Amino acid sequence: MKRIFLIWARSMSQVCAPSFYTAVRKAVIKAAVCIGISSAIFVLGAVISCISIPYISRFFHILLSLRPPSVAMLFSPFYAPFLVQAIETPSQKREFRLTSLWWSLAVYGAIAAASLGLYWIYAEGSLEVLIVLIVVLAALAPFFMATLMALPIAGVAVLFPPFKNAPLKKVWKHSQKMTWSELPFITCLLVGMMPLTLALYELLGACVRYQYMSIYGAGIIIHGFTLICWQIGWLAFMVFYQQRKHLYL
């Protein structure tokens, strides 16, 4: 108990480390072009969704009608390689990280397939099958939670040495160990933007209630804000990983 307390205390100390915030600031500046271009593309898509272009406008309208942070998540495989370049040291060869694209597509594809499968069973399956599925999911819930928690570190680990070309089993073992040891810092990182996000939700909610804007317009603003926050969050997470990974090699 004492050992895990000391490990978690060291993890929490990273929250207040000036070196972490300095590195994140430098990474955000390096990735400003990526963030700016992705934001411009998002604005273009939002404009197209509001005009009448057959099929294309409808597609963007449906996309922007999804719940946040769906848009930021769906397009993360395409901007992640550019974010990786902002974290690399000058001595490393600057190249597009196709690994991040395939990894992200594989993860989101598996999540989407599982979600569609569960929805199909819920909508079309019999009551007996649904009950069995609920029992199985309840029994496997701890495993699923542990897997989902370790996925972010595993996804970042495969982008950088020494796990760039390492076997998946080795990467997974490393990510599970680091996730558990750095749990306090990861939690703080995940909830760091929550107050600002809640403030935006409340402000936009008031605008909708007083009919200053439509629900769709508020959704577009939330998606745009989430897209920027998602990229900054991934940069912070990659900086954190680069600074702490040597403790778990």
Image (cartoon, helix red, strand yellow):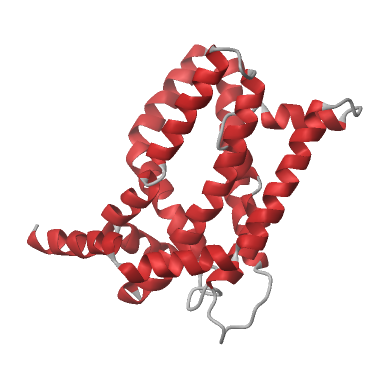
Residue 64 position in % (x across, y down)? 68, 31
Number of callouts: 0
Q: In this orientation, which residue lies closer to the viewer: 161 or 60? A: 60
Is residue 81 at all visible to an observer of this figure? no
Is residue 146 at all visible to an observer of this figure? yes
Residue 76 position in % (x across, y down)? 62, 51
Which residue: 54% across, 75% down?
88
Q: Quadrant of residue 132?
A: top left
| On-image quarter of the C terminus | bottom left
Which residue: 38% across, 38% down?
195
Q: In this orientation, which residue lies closer to the viewer: 113 or 78? A: 78
Note whether 246 is above or below 240 in the view shown. below
| On-image quarter of the N terminus | bottom left
Note whether 212 is above or below 198 in the view shown. above
Residue 71 position in % (x across, y down)? 63, 39
Q: Quadrant of residue 137?
A: top left
Which residue: 66% across, 59% down?
34
Which residue: 50% across, 77% down?
161
Left or right of 235? Residue 45 is: right
Left or right of 110? Residue 154 is: left
Residue 22 position in % (x across, y down)? 41, 69
| Residue at the extreme left of the image, as rendered | 2
| Residue at the extreme right of the image, as rendered | 54
